[in-house]
Image (spheres, helix red, strand yellow):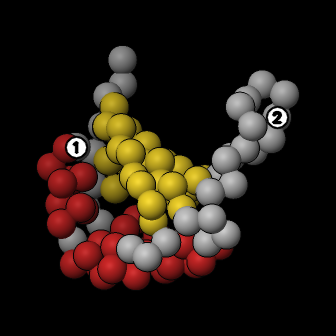
Amino acid sequence: MIHVLATIEIAEGKREDFLKEFRRIIKIVRDEDGCIEYGPAVDLQTSVSEPPRPNVVTVVEKWASVPALEAHLKAPHMDRYREMVRDVVKDIQILVLQPA
């Protein structure tokens, strides 16, 4: 199993627009072979964390393997999703982790 954290910086004021498009693909992705967990998260104000980033969405994922993740990234529905959000996404940083 691998863990993926995708930090997506969104254009100012466009986070809800991004999330609307993202939510359209969640079930499709969760039905992919090898997908264990897949969902968006946003920063929460707490006494133990950094200040919230209003223009950031973090996608928390778990995949059975690196090949499953690679197949996900090449899936036609992901190409369509990327096209739908390209005007609101400013930057993406992806971390792929393995349990220690």
Q: Which residue, given by chain and number where applicable, does mark 2 sit on?
A: 46
Q: CA distance from mark 1 to mark 2?
A: 33 Å
Q: Which residue, given by chain and number where applicable, does mark 1 sit on?
A: 65
Judging depth in this view, the residue of 12 and 5 nearest the camera is 12
Q: At which x and y percent is residue 51?
A: 75, 37
Q: Which mark is residue 31?
A: none
For the residue marked with disc 1, what is the amino acid? Ser
Residue at screen point 55% across, 65% down = 11
Q: Quadrant of the C terminus?
A: top left
Judge from the rendering whether residue 35 lies leftward or rightward of residue 43; answer left or right.
left
The image shows residue 39, relative to residue 66, as above or below, that is below
Q: Quadrant of the N terminus?
A: top left
Q: Quadrant of residue 81?
A: bottom left
Residue at screen point 43% across, 43% down = 5
The image shows residue 36, relative to residue 45, as above or below, that is below
N-term mark: 1 or 2: 2
Query: Mark 2, residues whose alpha carbon is within 10 Å: few (<14), some, or many (≥20)?
Result: few
Residue 82 in view, yes or no: yes
Residue at screen point 84% across, 28% down = 47
Which residue lies most toward the right here? 47
Q: At which x and y percent is residue 37?
A: 45, 52
